[in-house]
Amino acid sequence: MFVDGCFWHRCPLHATAPTTNGAWWERKLNANVARDRETDAWLTALGWSVLRFWEHEDMEHAAALIAHEVASRRSTGTV
């Protein structure tokens, strides 16, 4: 489970683009998102379920989704 910050991971609802040194920030933030996708693919290839949540999301709801995923994997014997 990952909790992604809206600024650092380019939340589609809350992301902002700094104007000072904008080109550097554009590369930095795009690299963060690309690394997120690479990490997701790597972990998925290893058999992990990757769950990502934005920092603004309800963490109680996120916890319920995680519990559901764990229960589902236990019932299928994939944990």
Image: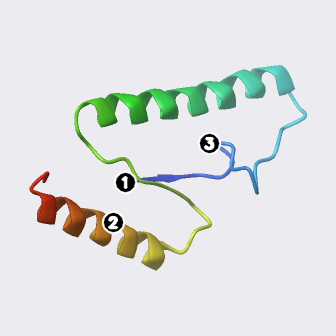
Instruction: Say which amino acid is labelled 3.
Output: His
For image coordinates 82% across by 20% down, the residue present is 23
Q: Residues within 10 Å of mark 1 (few under 14, many from 20)?
A: few
Tell me which amino acid carries mark 2: Ile
Residue at mark 1 to residue at mark 3: CA–CA distance: 15 Å
Q: Which residue is mark 3?
A: 9
| Secondary structure found at label 3 | loop
Nearest to the observer: residue 69 or residue 31: 69
Residue 17 appears in which quarter of the rendering?
top right
What secondary structure is marked by label 2?
Answer: helix
Q: Which residue is disc 2 drawn over? A: 66
Residue 50 vs 24, above or below: the answer is below
The answer to whether the residue labelled 3 contacts the one labelled 2, judged by CB atoms less than 8 Å apart, is: no
Colour scheme shown: rainbow
Query: Which residue is rendered at x = 13% and y = 65% of the image?
Result: 75
Count all numbered tags in the image, as a single digit: 3
**Spatial distance from mark 3 to mark 2, Cα to Cα?**
21 Å
Label annotation for residue 61: none
Task: Classify mark 1: helix, strand or loop.
Answer: loop
Quarter occupied by residue 13:
bottom right
Lower position in the chain sequence, tag 3 or tag 2 = 3
Q: Does 66 sit above or below residue 16?
A: below
Which label lies toward us, 2 or 1?
2
Hey, which residue is sitting farthest left in the picture?
77
Task: Residue 35 in the image: state x and y as whole percent.
Answer: 50, 28
| Left or right: where 69 falls relative to 34 | left
Nearest the viewer among 31 and 12 is 12
In the orientation shown, which residue stands out farthest toward the bottom? 60
Q: Position of residue 6 (x, y in %)?
A: 66, 52
- Residue assigned mark 1: 1
Is residue 40 shown above or below 28? below
